[in-house]
Amino acid sequence: MFSCWVWILILLCRSSIADENSTRDADIFPSSPEIERGSTLKRFCILGKHYTPHRNASHIIWKLNRELIAQENYNIVNETVSSVTIYNFTHSKARVKCFIKYLGKEQLLVQTEVKSGFPPDKPRNISCIYDVDIKLTCNWTSGRETNLATTYTLYRKIMSVPGPVMQEPKISICRSKTESCSFHYPNIPFGDNLCFQVKAENVLGEASSDCVPIRMEEIEKFQPPEIVSLKKNAGIKQLLTVTWKIPEKSTRLLDVKCQIRYRNLYSNSSEIDTVMVASGEEVSTHNLTGLWDSTEYLVAIRCISVESKLWSEWCREETASTEEKAPSEKVDLWRVIESSHTAGNRSVYLMWKLLSNFPPHGRILGYKIQYFPENNTALQTTNFTSDKKFTLLLNEEAYIVSVTAYNSAGNSPAAILRIPSTDEKSSQIIEAVRTFTTEEEMILEWTVSEPGVTEYVVEWYEEMETDPFSRSWQYISNSTKWKPNKKNFKSFVCYNISVYPVYGNKVTAPYSIQTYVQEKEPSEGPVADTGFPGKNEVTIKWKEISKDKRNGFINNYTIFYKPEGGKELNETVNSDVLQYTLKSLQANTQYTVYIMASNRAGGTSGEPKTFKTLKFNKEDIVFIAIPVGLSMLFLLGLWITCILKKHLFKKVCWPDIPNPAESVAVQWPLDASVGVACEDKTRGLENISVLEDCFPEEEHERSLLMNCEKCVSGSTEVNTNEAQNISEYRISLLNGDKKLPNNEEQEVAKHLSPSMPYIITDQDFRSQIHSALIPAKKIQSIEMLEDDLCDSQQAPIKNEENDNEEVLSTEEDFSEKTLFNPYLRNSVKTREFLVSENLPEHSKNEPKSQAAVLPGLQQNVVGQTYITLDMVGLATAH
């Protein structure tokens, strides 16, 4: 039972494990064929017993690579064999695959690779080279590519000498898979009766060439000769002698022809001399003539047999120089003069180059520099250098400088320049210089004011170059135009170009310009500096772009600015402007600004910056600050005044309300008995008067009395009769009655006495006179009031003689009204006190300081009704 399950598992694994290259009980033939391209391909696929009886040949399908082959190309041979036919097979390589399709699934059974190609063509163009005593190599052309593995066989046949008995040729074979094959030494017979044949063969066929006879002498090739020596002959100009050796293995029976190739280092072309070498000679010599003096030459040699068709390779080149000659041309000399130093000395930079003339000047050993003051040739100084530059330290005088090149044969002519003195000024001969470019050239033209000048020096260097020795120059004769190639200049780089007129050895004032051979937009844009913005304007500043990043001449700057959420605006300024004020901006607004620098090729913008305008500018702040400051100063002054005058303001604005209990103007009775009669009715009343109201019209008097009535009637202890009596008294006053009946006076006095708790003494009255009140307009006497008041007195008035006299003197001068003081609620506007003229003389002569105590009033008793002669300052009539 267990073994059955093992076999079932094995069968399942065999059916599930497979790949494209595996064969599942099937076969295909012929396997891996090679056929001729364009022919018909036919293949058979055979099923094994594993697939029958459920599957048969009708389930087989064919594919070429991944493409399904049409069903009409299938042929069912029997139940297990199926064939396919492919016409005109043109693939160089392809895979033919056999599948079985069952229940909708394709399963690869077997596959094979088919190659197509061509049979070989007949080999042609057989040629051989005999490297003497090394190898014999033959080459041929095979013709069309077969695309199949092809083998070539080279036959070397040694033909027998014609005679009565014919002998079989001796054949040597060399096989190769390429179009070349070699026989190596010593298997190299030498003779005239050799024949070479090539046969090519592959699975589709074979082809052989004809047997081509080749003479060994014609294919003989020597090894390169060896140069033994190459040298110049002392005292002989323009000549070199070369000696060489022929290889020992070369034939000795024939003459040898050799070629000598030589060229100088300044030329790309060569010349060839041919020399015959007799047979048997191993070393040969030859003189090369007509050479340049002091010139280095390269020499090489090759040789060939006189009967051979093949030259040897060139030997290794050797170098030698001809006899030297003194340079015949002066150097091309120029100078750069630095400004004078503080000590009066100056640096002069000399530079020179050799003229590019042929023949060259030979090998230069060095240069001799001589200079001396123009006015003193005895002070000549000489220096030597091997470089092509030299620095002189000269004083302010004019100098003559000469430079000479020398070699072993002598010196060149001297190149001379004059260095002007520091205070020498030369006229400007060149009036204008302009440049323009073409596709290949930069053209420089200038105009002169003196047509006699025939020689000029054009000097140019990069603007950023600071080394004086890096400058270039060129002498121009009989022309005012210079056309150098644009390749001599860098693109996008600014050059300083100067043109110097030359008179012999004297160089005059130059004319200098700047130019670009080619421009492009700047590499970077300016960076805006907004500084401190104002309310409606801002000043934008920027720095120039560095010279190495301009890439051209800056024509202008454009300032772009845009308010937040608004439209972008711009302003354009010239290239020499490095700041600009933007005006008419919106206050308290954020702006974005950037600057674009432009040249002829385009423009480049810098980084954008933001700024915000102010809400107020300086003028606004000043206009606000001045009123505020003045107001603060005013308030400060007012505050200081209030501090200094606080007592005065207190008296005016907040006067003290007198407390009757604390008054010293009267003596309060010890008991509240009423009805105590005064011994003298007129005593003490001489100081009591009623002030007339301060208003000029009678209506104001009525208003005064009405206010008084209101005040009196407000008392809780005044009855209706008392109010009526007061009213009658008031009416009599308004009607001008000076006196009242006796009983009425007493009645009025009786009604007034409860309202008058005290009487102001002369001293207190005088202290009120000096307050800020205007004088009263008129004075009226009220004699009738005095009698009634006297009847109501309960105690004699204390006399203060001195104070009463001052009050009386002041009362006589009152002539104008005083203002009403609204502070005191019970005040009857303003009152005046004056002495009645109708009083008896004895009353006037009594002591005026005596005060009276009104009957019916008690000291320090709360709630009793009284009328005060309020502390109102009275204007004094002085």
Image (spheres, rainbow, N blue to C red):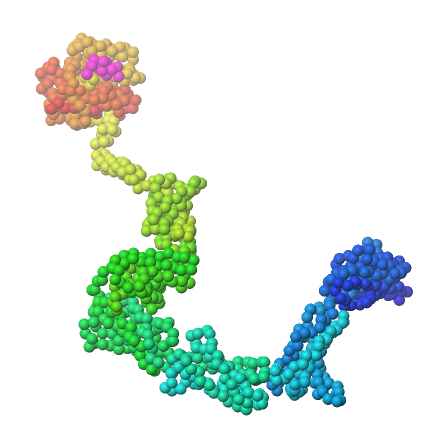
User: Could you say which is closer to the camera, residue 50 or residue 216?
Assistant: 216
Q: Position of residue 200 (x, y in %)?
A: 72, 74
Residue depicted at 27% across the width and 72% down the height: 416
Kindly indicate the quadrant of the structure image that contains residue 334.
Answer: bottom left
Q: Position of residue 81 (x, y in %)?
A: 86, 62
Q: Is 163 left or right of 386, judged from the image as shown?
A: right
Kindly indicate the quadrant of the structure image that contains residue 233.
Answer: bottom left
Q: Quadrant of the N terminus?
A: bottom right
Q: Is residue 705 magenta?
A: yes
User: Could you say which is closer to the camera, residue 440 or residue 259?
Assistant: 259
Regarding residue 111, the answer to whether it shows in the image is yes
Q: Is residue 629 magenta?
A: no
Residue at the far front in the pictured view: 164
User: Could you say which is closer to the camera, residue 829 or residue 508?
Assistant: 508
Residue depicted at 71% across the width and 85% down the height: 159
Q: Position of residue 71 (x, y in %)?
A: 82, 55
User: Could you say which is closer to the camera, residue 757 or residue 709?
Assistant: 709
Q: Report the span colored magenta.
A: 696-707
Q: Is 56 left or right of 191, judged from the image as shown?
A: right
Kindly indicate the quadrant of the structure image that contains residue 361.
Answer: bottom left
Q: Quadrant of the C terminus?
A: top left
Residue depicted at 55% across the width and 91% down the height: 280
Residue 664 drawn above or below residue 57: above
Residue 636 drawn above or below residue 683: below
Regarding residue 226, the answer to whether it shows in the image is no
Residue 803 drawn above or below residue 693: below
Q: Position of residue 214 (x, y in %)?
A: 65, 81
Residue depicted at 23% across the width and 37% down the height: 637
Q: Is 285 left or right of 702, judged from the image as shown?
A: right
Q: Main secondary structure of the magenta part?
A: helix
Q: Is 310 left or right of 538, judged from the image as shown?
A: right
